[in-house]
Each structure stands twice: as structure tokens, then as C-alpha cells.
Image (cartoon, helix red, strand yellow):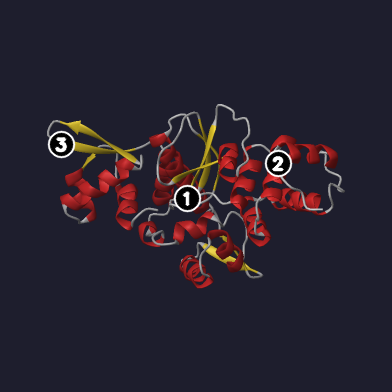
């Protein structure tokens, strides 16, 4: 997410430092610092001001920058730029409560030995401890978690604003987010989802004025299992749940994949209810789901064959 040199600049820069002054402080060449500052400007973490022939670097008012600089000031003996490189911020992002290595590995999609290696680094410095196999922050170092969260959110917001200024983030994790926009987004890493995506599976619904996109940094398209979860995150009312039921009836969705996606988005109960509804032909009590006869009519309207 951030390179060590970028973390060094954010930890060191005072309002109004020039590139030359930063280069002296950090013992790097001016050309290297200039490129680093440009990267931070692109991420919205600093900006520059002209002062005659000099360019001054100013930290942005992003909460992530404020959180980080507060940590650096209050714990000046800790080399945060060294600690927070590699997978560290990603692991800390998922340490919002005491968790095991396995839990963090599952949530962050990393190998357990990678998570172990990161946590050992923080344990050795006394920033993280363990209790009954679960890792948690010591003292006030849970602010590292706050920094990781604020930084991820800031970068997500910044990516979204580049392509859709009035966009809204509906869900996010460390490196992905679901967004609502008022315009079409044409960018490789943003994948259309929501009701518009159902058309790819020959299910066409009346659309609202909003568009929905999933960002994951990959060129993949949204799968049926992901689409079902995204639809519930956008609106978990009865209409959208009925549309998900149509999709699950119409497309061969791998149930293991669907359950895995449900766990990722915190929708285990909702997805389980949809699957039970279809398996029992509506014989479950859930006010968010239609009567079976109503769903049969809806399926017939959209030419979806229901399994008997």
C-alpha cells in the first residue's frame, strides 16, 4: 500500500519542507525524494506549493496522515516506516479485535506463515501480545489498526474520486470496495455490479439512476456468487432478495463459492436463508422473502425454470 520511503516522508515532513530539506533529513537524493513526493501527491496524502523556485511539501488533511503522524510523535523511538512495510498494514487492518493467525489469514487472504511473520515482528517490539492463541494490541497501539483502516479508506476514496467525484463507498476491506456512482465508470479495475450486471445472465430489471461498481485491482468480472452478495449489500429488501433468488435459480452457482463470498461480506445468514428458501420451496419464516406462489409468478415472468 505504501513503500518504506513514502512512510518515511509522511513520518518526517513538516509543513513547508522543501524537497531538498526532506532529502537531507532522510539521506536520499533529491531526485528520489521528488519521485516519492509525486507518488504521495497522486495518492492525496501530501500536496505541494510553489515558493519562488522551490517546491514545498505539505501533509494533506487526510485523517490517515494525522493518525500516523500522531503515532510517530508519541512513539518517536519506534521505527514505524520499517515496521509497516510489506504485508504489515494488511495484517493490522484485520486486527480490529483479538484474532488467531488462521482468522487473520482467512480474512486477508494471506498464508499463515506470512501473518505469523508479521505478528512476530510486532510482538518482538511489544506492540502486540497474545492471549489464548489470539493476538491483540498492547496499550494504545490499537491506533495502528485505526491508521491501517483510515489509510485504506482514504486510498479507496481517492481512487473512486478520480473516476466518479460523487461516488459513495458502500462496503470495503483492505484492497477492495463496492461503490455507488451517478455516472458510468470506464476503468479496468472497476467492474459493473448490481442490477445492471444481471443482464449478463439474461435477467433484465428496471434500473435506477445509480450505477454500482466493484473495485478489486484485477481485470476479472463479477461472478454470480459475488453479484448475489453485492446486490444484498446495495439493498437487502424483499425485491432485491427476490432478484437474487432468480439468479440462484437461473445460473449454476457453486454453493461453496457462494458461502465463501457470504463469509467475506458478512452475509452468512442472508445467503443461508436464500438457499433454504429454494431448497424448501419457500417453507421458511422470513418476512424479507416472498410467498412461494409470488416467487413462482416472478420466475415465470422472467422465464426462469424452478427446480421441482
Marks 1 and 3: which is nearer the front?
1
The residue sitting at 63% across, 40% down in the picture is 203
Is there any visible trace of residue 114 in the rendered image? yes
Q: Which mark is residue 216?
A: 1
Residue 106 or residue 5, whichever sits in front? 106
Q: Is residue 306 left or right of residue 215?
A: right
Query: Crowding near pointer 2: few (<14 within 10 Å), some, many (20+)?
Result: few
Q: Which of these two is toward me, 210 or 21?
A: 210
Closer to us: 91 or 223: 223
Q: Earlier in the sequence, mark 1 or mark 3?
A: 3
Q: Name the spot of residue 38 as percent of width and height, x first.
A: 26, 44
SS at mark 3 in the image: strand
Q: Which residue is mark 2?
A: 303
Whether pointer 1 and pointer 2 mark residues with C-beta atoms closer than 8 Å, the reply is no
Return the disc, 2 or 3, that comes first in the chain's sequence: 3
At 44% from the left and 62% from the top, the residue drawn is 87
**Count of numbered circles on the image:** 3
Q: Secondary structure at mark 1?
A: loop
Q: Residue farthest to the left?
A: 53
Position of 49 compared to 213: left or right?
A: left
Residue 81 image point, x, y percent = 36, 57
Q: Position of residue 200 (x, y in %)?
A: 56, 44
Q: Which residue is mark 3?
A: 54
Mark 3 burial class by Cα count in 10 Å: few <14, some 14-19, many 20+: few
- What is the distance, in whole Å, between disc 2 and disc 3 at their CAs? 67 Å
Amino acid at each position: 500500500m505504501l513503500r518504506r520511503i513514502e512512510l518515511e516522508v509522511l513520518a518526517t515532513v513538516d509543513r513547508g519542507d522543501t524537497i531538498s530539506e526532506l532529502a537531507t533529513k532522510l539521506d536520499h537524493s533529491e531526485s528520489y525524494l521528488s519521485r516519492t513526493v509525486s507518488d504521495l501527491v497522486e495518492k492525496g496524502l501530501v500536496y505541494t506549493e510553489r515558493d519562488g523556485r522551490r517546491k514545498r511539501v505539505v501533509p494533506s488533511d487526510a485523517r490517515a496522515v494525522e493518525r500516523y503522524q500522531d503515532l510517530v510523535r508519541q512513539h518517536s523511538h519506534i521505527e514505524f516506516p520499517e515496521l509497516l512495510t510489506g504485508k504489515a498494514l494488511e495484517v493490522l487492518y484485520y486486527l480490529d479485535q483479538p484474532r488467531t493467525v488462521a482468522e487473520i489469514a482467512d480474512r486477508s487472504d494471506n498464508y499463515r506463515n506470512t501473518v505469523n511473520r508479521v505478528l512476530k515482528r510486532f510482538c518482538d517490539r511489544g506492540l502486540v501480545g497474545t492471549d489464548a492463541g489470539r493476538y491483540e494490541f498492547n496499550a494504545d497501539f490499537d491506533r495502528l489498526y485505526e491508521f491501517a483502516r483510515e489509510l485504506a479508506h482514504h486510498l479507496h476514496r481517492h481512487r473512486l474520486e478520480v473516476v466518479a467525484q460523487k461516488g459513495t463507498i458502500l462496503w470495503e476491506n483492505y484492497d477492495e470496495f463496492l461503490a455507488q456512482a451517478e455516472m458510468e465508470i470506464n476503468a479496468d479495475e472497476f467492474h459493473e455490479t448490481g442490477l445492471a450486471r444481471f443482464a449478463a445472465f439474461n435477467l433484465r430489471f428496471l434500473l435506477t439512476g445509480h450505477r454500482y461498481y466493484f473495485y478489486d485491482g484485477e481485470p476479472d468480472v463479477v461472478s454470480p456468487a459475488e453479484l448475489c452478495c453485492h446486490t444484498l449489500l446495495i439493498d437487502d429488501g424483499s425485491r432485491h432478495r427476490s432478484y437474487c433468488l432468480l439468479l440462484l435459480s437461473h445460473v449454476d452457482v457453486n454453493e461453496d463459492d457462494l458461502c465463501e463470498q457470504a463469509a467475506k461480506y458478512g452475509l452468512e445468514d442472508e445467503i443461508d436463508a436464500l438457499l433454504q428458501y429454494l431448497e424448501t420451496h419457500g417453507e421458511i419464516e422470513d418476512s424479507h422473502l416472498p410467498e412461494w406462489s409470488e416467487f413462482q409468478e416472478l420466475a415465470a415472468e422472467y422465464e426462469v425454470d424452478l427446480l421441482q
